[in-house]
């Protein structure tokens, strides 16, 4: 059985690619493994290996000293398409008494899509005796799917709304919720509602879930066109979606919040950053980051260090590291020693550019004694401001993740803006889509509404897409947008 007394051996020396300079500490960045295929979940195992799910359906272990990969399970019924596949995984922390690994993944029967939660038993280097704990409706997107074990041994499952927004507030639906289960799949007796798995509700698409050292539960969640979130989860809490996005800052949201006692996020981001893997950092190894949430981001292509106050109820600062250095970041975990491991996600369905031959990778961030690379990175404090004078940046922030910086789009998902009949055609139709959004039948992705942007910002973006990449249509004025609101 794994997890009792891992064999000690001399630590290998990985080549240092870059350094990070903090206030006092110097950090090394090394590549542990490369050539992976969308490592969706990474977690530190009881055998001092990195356990990993790859989206196409494999569970493997990575030796953090050598990068050697050993596959331990292939789940053949996994259905992978866009954001579906083999997703979340958690290992029970009391492996001697409960030698279990929990995973969730997408399956498809005929035209019906489901999210399936399964428990495996660890036997040496194998996972055996699969036991299905729960199956819920799924979708081609918004499946959530992170897992965590609470300090008192309960299993938490963060589910998405399965692209049916009202699921999140529907008491009879298990989508758009945090579910709390016993490890045998039964409903805990002390859940808020007798016989119900629901612990908290009102979520769109959570992609991060973690407990702090003092037992607080945090999530990271994708918003629509605005208000990505990090939330502190409370028993029976209502987090507002779809009636509220992020902070309660509109009159309708304030009324809903007062009526239903909804909870605001600890932090929200507009422009969105696509938050993904989330873990708590409580080690003394990197003192500047102690008592922080570490957040991997996809759209923002960065690692965020979110410093908490002493009791964990507020985020004091948001600092950005690795921005645009390694592409999309999906997962993050911490070793008992305090080293940090981050997985990239450049082979997924929505890359910013062509993946490198070395993608996807697992990076190691560790404490160093001295600077040993030619490139030294520093963090920066997140800013809420966007510069309307930098139109390239404005377009990239709000449109680039879907339609790409060169306007090429993603075939089958996001239409190209280059040469688009909607872009080059009637101004009124384009402004209408921009302000109100657009949903195409039989396609999971939809154009969100950008009415929250100012008339000036909207005019700048629309003019940019009408006059770039060979497009030669006329400019759009702020007054034209104001008239159509």
Image (cartoon, grey):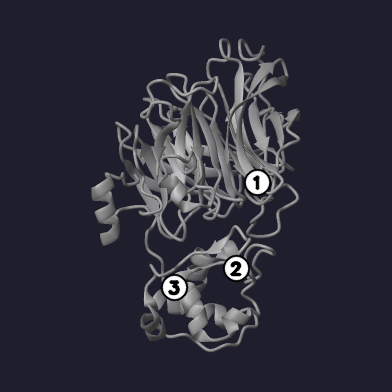
The residue that disc 1 covers is 112
Relative to 147, 217 lies left or right = left
What x and y, as percent, mark residue 470?
65, 83
Q: Nearer the viewer, mark 2 or mark 1?
A: 1
What x and y, as percent, mark residue 158?
49, 37
Nearer to me, 56 or 253: 253
The residue that disc 2 covers is 405
The residue that disc 3 covers is 435
- For the image, the number of numbered tags is 3
Label 2 sits on a secondary structure element that is loop
240 vs 40: above or below: below
Q: Nearer the viewer, mark 2 or mark 3?
A: 3
What x and y, as percent, mark residue 337?
53, 24
* Distance between the alpha carbons at the discs numbered 2 and 3: 21 Å
Mark 1: few/some/many CA within 10 Å (<14, 14-19, 20+): few
* Distance between the alpha carbons at the discs numbered 3 and 1: 33 Å
Mark 2: few/some/many CA within 10 Å (<14, 14-19, 20+): some
Nearer to me, 134 or 59: 134
């Amino acid at each position: 059985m794994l997890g009792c007394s891992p064999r000690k051996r001399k630590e290998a020396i990985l080549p240092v690619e870059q350094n990070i300079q903090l206030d006092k500490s110097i950090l090394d960045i090394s590549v542990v493994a490369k050539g992976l295929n969308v490592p969706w979940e990474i977690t530190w195992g009881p055998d001092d290996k990195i356990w990993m799910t790859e989206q196409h359906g494999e569970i493997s272990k990575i030796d953090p000293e050598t990068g050697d990969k050993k596959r331990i399970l292939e789940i053949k019924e996994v259905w992978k398409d866009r954001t579906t596949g083999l997703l979340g995984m958690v290992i029970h922390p009391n492996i001697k008494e409960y030698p279990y690994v929990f995973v969730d993944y997408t399956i498809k029967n005929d035209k019906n899509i489901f999210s399936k939660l399964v428990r495996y038993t660890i036997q040496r280097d194998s996972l055996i005796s699969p036991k299905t704990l729960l199956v819920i409706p799924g979708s081609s997107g918004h499946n959530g799917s992170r897992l965590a074990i609470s300090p008192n041994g309960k299993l938490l499952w963060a589910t998405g709304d399965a692209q049916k927004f009202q699921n999140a507030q529907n008491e009879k639906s298990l989508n758009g919720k945090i579910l709390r289960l016993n490890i045998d799949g039964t409903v805990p007796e002390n859940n808020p509602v007798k016989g119900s798995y629901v612990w908290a509700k009102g979520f769109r698409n959570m992609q991060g879930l973690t407990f702090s050292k003092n037992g607080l539960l945090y999530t990271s969640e994708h918003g629509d066109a605005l208000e990505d979130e990090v939330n502190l989860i409370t028993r029976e809490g209502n987090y507002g979606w779809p009636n509220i996005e992020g902070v309660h800052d509109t009159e309708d949201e304030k009324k809903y919040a007062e009526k239903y006692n909804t909870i605001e996020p600890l932090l929200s981001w507009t422009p969105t950053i696509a938050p993904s893997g989330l873990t708590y950092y409580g080690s003394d190894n990197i003192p500047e980051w102690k008592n922080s949430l570490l957040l991997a981001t996809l759209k923002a292509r960065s690692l965020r260090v979110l410093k908490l106050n002493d009791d964990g109820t507020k985020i004091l600062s948001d600092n950005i590291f690795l921005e645009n250095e390694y592409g999309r970041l999906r997962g993050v975990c911490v070793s008992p020693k305090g080293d940090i491991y981050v997985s990239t996600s450049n082979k997924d369905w929505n890359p910013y550019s062509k993946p490198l031959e070395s993608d996807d990778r697992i990076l190691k961030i560790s404490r160093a004694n001295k600077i040993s690379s030619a490139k030294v990175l520093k963090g920066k404090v997140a800013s809420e401001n966007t510069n309307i004078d930098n139109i390239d940046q404005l377009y990239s922030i709000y449109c680039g993740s879907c339609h790409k910086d060169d306007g090429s789009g993603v075939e089958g998902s996001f239409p190209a803006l280059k040469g688009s009949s909607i872009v080059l055609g009637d101004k009124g139709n384009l402004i209408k889509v921009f302000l109100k959004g657009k949903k195409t039948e039989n396609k999971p992705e939809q154009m969100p509404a950008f009415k929250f942007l100012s008339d000036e910002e909207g005019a700048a973006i629309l003019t940019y897409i009408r006059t770039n990449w060979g497009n030669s249509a006329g400019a759009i004025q702020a007054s034209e947008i104001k008239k159509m609101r």
